[in-house]
Amino acid sequence: MAQGESGMHPSTWQQFGVREWRHSVLKHPGSGAREGVEACLSRIAELNPTLNAIHVLLDDEAFRTADELDQLALQPDFQPGLLHGVPILIKDEIDVAGTPTTFGTAGNPTPKARDSLLVKRLREAGAIILGKTLMPAFGAFPFTESDAFGITRNPWDPSRTPGGSSGGSAVAVAARMVPAAIGGDGGGSIRIPSSHCGTVGLKPCRGSVPTDPYADLWMELGTSGPIARSVECCSLIFDAIATDHTRDSLLTKRVGPRKLVIGVNTTPATPGIKVHDDHLRAVAYAVHRLRAKGHEVREVDFKRPDPTLAFVTQFYGGIREEIAGLEFPERIEPRHKRTKLLGAWARFKLKEWAREYSRTFGETMTQKLEGFDALLTPTVADRPARAGAYLKTGSLRTQLASLSSTAFAAEWNVSGHAAISLPGGMGSDGLPVGVQLVGPRGEADLLQVAQILDSAMLYDDAIPHFQWPSA
């Protein structure tokens, strides 16, 4: 591939996180933003036919935006935005003007007239919206595969799932198609694919990121958040999209080095779930590295109320509301027609109870986390399933198969706490393993703790090789 006007080879861009990407664009005013977009599109053309992470590319619009940013950078009084020139992909449950918001289905084909508030904030920060990523229908399952858009594959081994439901976003970041992407998380949907793909994925607190134009996501279970290559990258994006009262991350709340008190728990909230040895080893290694750096780590007997009924009520109630809002609900997958029927019991009074239970459960969990800087757990309990294994299974069977993925994640959607998945090394199968940190005091504090743990870990920042495994 030829070098651009800046003299950089297109593959050089693949090494950049958000801050480095922005710096390089600003270092080459007049051409940097366009060259960055070209590098992303080249990588996408090479890998997306195999990985199937992206289904809408806004290349013409992205080039127009890049050219505008390049010209602005030549002005003497130019003040660059926080994400100036950074290409970002958006999960397809978030409105981007000129594209449909499909929710992973064939039922919403009409393009939206305007951006969601989240996307508007990204643009105001100087980000370039490059397109939209794939998700399973309604984000219901931790496997990114659907009748409408096919199977999304893990970049480390395309025979395996990247997880979900933000699988397309995690794959695009892990494969270096873009430096960052936006996902959504209603039961682990940012953290699960981040664990499977080796990225960093932040689920913000309830209410920290706007859901406009939708009242909420899955009756307040869901929120949007960044998937990127580092804690710092997630912090930069969070600062750009957060509501005004929560714009307080690593950039705006700096503290000096401190001794952390970390709780650790490897017992999943879901009874009967066996935790794979790879995940237990990853947590044990994180504990070892934290203690080696002088931090206190204590095992926590984390008994808590069972949030299952509230979660299931919000899950079914939220999906039923999304189905009702489709242009052509008759076009959804057969299993989600059954999901709608199965959730008929999620009526108004029960839904209101579930919302109130979530708030009370959140207060209870905050009390249980008192005295800790964070809680450390596995992100998921099991290894990535075979890609496509659940494409044609029924709703109940797929939900049962999902329990190992959501066992450590979903309770924090019910409670509303911030949680983040960090790379924890590689498993015995050659695929990434993630560890989860849950924060008792919001995103700002959690991101700083995550930065400390991330810097303490010793693992290779490798790029997936994208080869099919031998027969």
Image: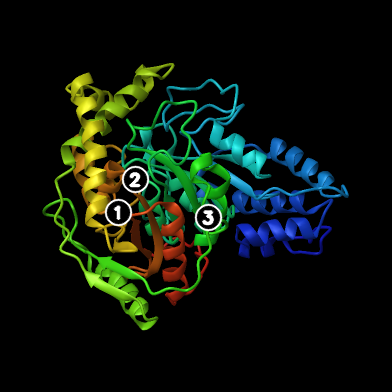
Q: Reply above or below: 448 against 394.
A: below
Residue 12 coordinates in the image, percent (x, y): 68, 65
In the image, is 364 to the left or to the right of 163?
A: left
Point 27% across, 46% down: residue: 410
Residue 94 coordinates in the image, percent (x, y): 49, 33
- Residue under pointer 1: 385
- Residue under pointer 3: 235
Q: Reply above or below: 439 against 111.
A: below
In the image, is 218 to the left or to the right of 152?
A: left
C-beta proximity under 8 Å, tags 1 and 3: no
Q: Earlier in the sequence, mark 3 or mark 2?
A: 2
Q: Which mark is residue 133?
A: none
Quadrant for the N terminus, please. bottom right
- Residue under pointer 2: 143
Quadrant for the C terminus, please. bottom left
Quadrant in the rendering for residue 430: bottom left
Residue 284 coordinates in the image, percent (x, y): 28, 74
Q: Residues within 10 Å of mark 3 (few under 14, many from 20)?
A: many
What amino acid is at disc 1?
Answer: Ala
Q: Residues within 10 Å of mark 1 (few under 14, many from 20)?
A: some
Quadrant in the rendering for residue 282: bottom left
C-beta proximity under 8 Å, tags 2 and 1: yes
Point 19% across, 21% down: residue: 349
What amino acid is at disc 2?
Answer: Phe
In the image, is 234 to the left or to the right of 283?
A: right
Residue 403 visible in image = yes
Q: Reply above or below: 438 against 169.
A: below
Q: Secondary structure at mark 1?
A: loop
Point 52% across, 49% down: residue: 238
Q: Secondary structure at mark 2?
A: loop
> From the viewer's perspective, is the residue at label 1 or at label 3 nearer?
3
Q: CA distance from mark 1 to mark 3?
A: 30 Å
